[in-house]
């Protein structure tokens, strides 16, 4: 009986560690408009699914995980989205641009962003 309970508890703990829910505060900025405030919006890292869902946006594929960072993004014919969340400080940055603009950045040049996010995220606390 004790072994069954221990295995069940281990399974529950492992499942919880696979998803990390965060609460974020910061801004979503646009070149020609006022910034949108991110005030207590949620984000989720789902290691099992290999996705990160930033505030306001849809989930994106995790592209790299290190001890200090989780990188995520999406590249389509019309949009290039990439970002990082720092696992130590909780700093989240994300850029949205056209693919041709990302190529400029990769070549060391400046580029025009469609939007960019800067936020600070902390682990969410259960309400009940």
Image: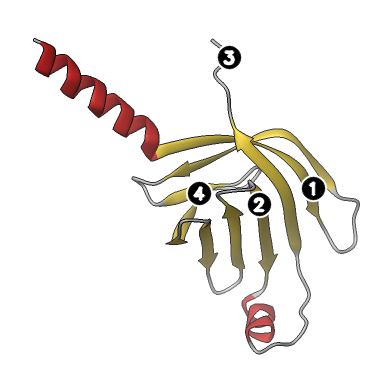
- Residue identifier under label 3: 127
Query: Disc 1 versus disc 4: distance between alpha carbons?
Result: 18 Å
- Under circle 2, the secondary element is strand
Query: Disc 2 versus disc 3: distance between alpha carbons?
Result: 24 Å
Q: Position of residue 103 (x, y in %)?
A: 63, 84
Name the one closer to the observer, 26 or 32: 26
Q: Which mark is residue 52?
A: 4
Query: Is residue 19 left or right of 2 when viewed as pictured?
Result: right
Label 1: how many residues lie within 10 Å, few (<14), some (14-19) or many (20+)?
some
- Residue identifier under label 2: 92
Q: Residue at x 67, y 50 (%)?
A: 91
Label 2: how many residues lie within 10 Å, few (<14), some (14-19) or many (20+)?
many
Q: Earlier in the sequence, mark 4 or mark 3?
A: 4
- Cβ atoms under marks 4 and 3 closer than 8 Å: no
Query: Disc 1 versus disc 2: distance between alpha carbons?
Result: 10 Å
Query: Is residue 53 left or right of 117 when viewed as pictured?
Result: left
Question: Which of the two discs, 3 and 1, sits closer to the camera?
Answer: 3
- Residue identifier under label 1: 27
- Under circle 1, the secondary element is strand
Q: Which mark is residue 105?
A: none
Query: Disc 3 versus disc 1: distance between alpha carbons?
Result: 25 Å
Q: Earlier in the sequence, mark 4 or mark 2?
A: 4
């Amino acid at each position: 009986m004790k072994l069954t309970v221990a295995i069940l508890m281990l399974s529950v703990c492992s499942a919880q560690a696979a998803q990390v829910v965060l609460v974020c505060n910061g801004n979503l900025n646009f070149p020609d408009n006022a910034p949108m405030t991110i005030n207590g919006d949620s984000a989720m890292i789902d290691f099992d699914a290999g996705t990160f869902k930033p505030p306001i946006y849809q989930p994106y594929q995790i592209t790299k995980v290190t001890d200090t960072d989780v990188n995520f993004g999406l590249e389509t014919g019309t949009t290039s989205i990439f970002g990082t969340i720092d696992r130590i400080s909780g700093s989240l940055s994300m850029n949205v641009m056209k693919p041709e603009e990302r190529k400029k950045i990769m070549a060391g040049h400046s580029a025009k962003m469609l939007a960019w996010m800067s936020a600070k995220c902390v682990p969410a606390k259960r309400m009940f």
